[in-house]
Image (tube, rainbow, N blue to C red):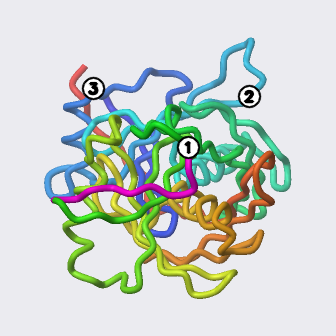
Amino acid sequence: MLVNFTKMHGLGNDFVVIDERKNEMPFDANGIRALGDRHTGIGFDQLLGIDKAGDDDDCAFRYSIWNSDGQVSGQCGNGVRCVAAWLHRAGELKLNQEVRLRSPSGPVSVRLIDAESVTVNMGEPDFEPSRIPFDTPHQAESYPLDIDGAPLTLGSVSMGNPHAVVQVEDLKASALQRLGPQITTHPRFPEGCNTSFVKLLDRTHVHMRVHERGSGWTQACGTGACATMAVLRLLGKVDHEVDVRLPGGHLMISWDGPGKPLWMTGPACFVFEGRLHVDA
């Protein structure tokens, strides 16, 4: 059986996109891991499956997300932009038309500014620890976390998936190579988390890098940029719109604060089309 796929990326956070509108996803967790291997497969941070929404759904389409380790993910900010751009190329979405899509963690609204630039309503950040989930008795703006007997301070929030946000002075510090995986798999995050290390430049500019659960260090993480904005905004350290620079490029994130949705704007790029041979 031949399966068509599209390779895409958002700021270097790369994806394989598969059309599920006529056929179910042909890969199980082992197949996804093999496909995601950058030496013997295609290679990607996440696999995206696009399907029609149900007849009783108020969303136009739904999409599924798997990390390169074969595990399901609840949300992917760079991925949803690529889903929107893919649907536009397929003739399903018009420019400047706001459309709701069903993500694994709930509906999101998207609007294509042009063929490869997308604005996404990511919903309201959720700081409730039990819904992140993060193991702590009380909600707070920041939390202490013990790493090998050494304390650090982080913020935590859900953007449809769990996030930790750590402010640092040096994004190139060698200790981050160790801390990223340790925070991502820390037992106080029972489902793991994406860990963002953030250098605050001023009230409208931040630099960051991200270690993602299931994918490791990535060039960009859309929900990580959103989580960073949410945590810093809650702390009163940034204004309502922030330019977030990641290793792969820039995202514009805006949030007016609690009770309001958070918006992300950034690129979605096509790389190539291909076919996979899958044993039926």
Disc marking residue 59: 2
**Residue type indicated by callout 2:** Cys
- Relative to 262, is 71 above or below? above
Q: Name the outermost residue toward the top.
A: 56
Which residue in the protein does label 1 denote? 139
- Relative to 51, is 270 above or below? below
Relative horizontal placement of residue 63, taking residue 192 as reference (left or right): right
Percent from the top left, x then y, of residue 45? 35, 53
Kindly indicate the quadrant of the structure image that contains residue 256: bottom right
Which residue in the protein does label 3 denote? 28
Percent from the top left, x then y, of residue 33? 22, 40
Percent from the top left, x then y, of residue 89? 65, 50
Q: Earlier in the sequence, mark 1 or mark 2?
A: 2
**Residue type indicated by callout 1:** Gln
First to last magenta residue range: 140-148
Q: Nearer the viewer, mark 1 or mark 3?
A: 1
Mark pair 1, 2: CA separation: 32 Å
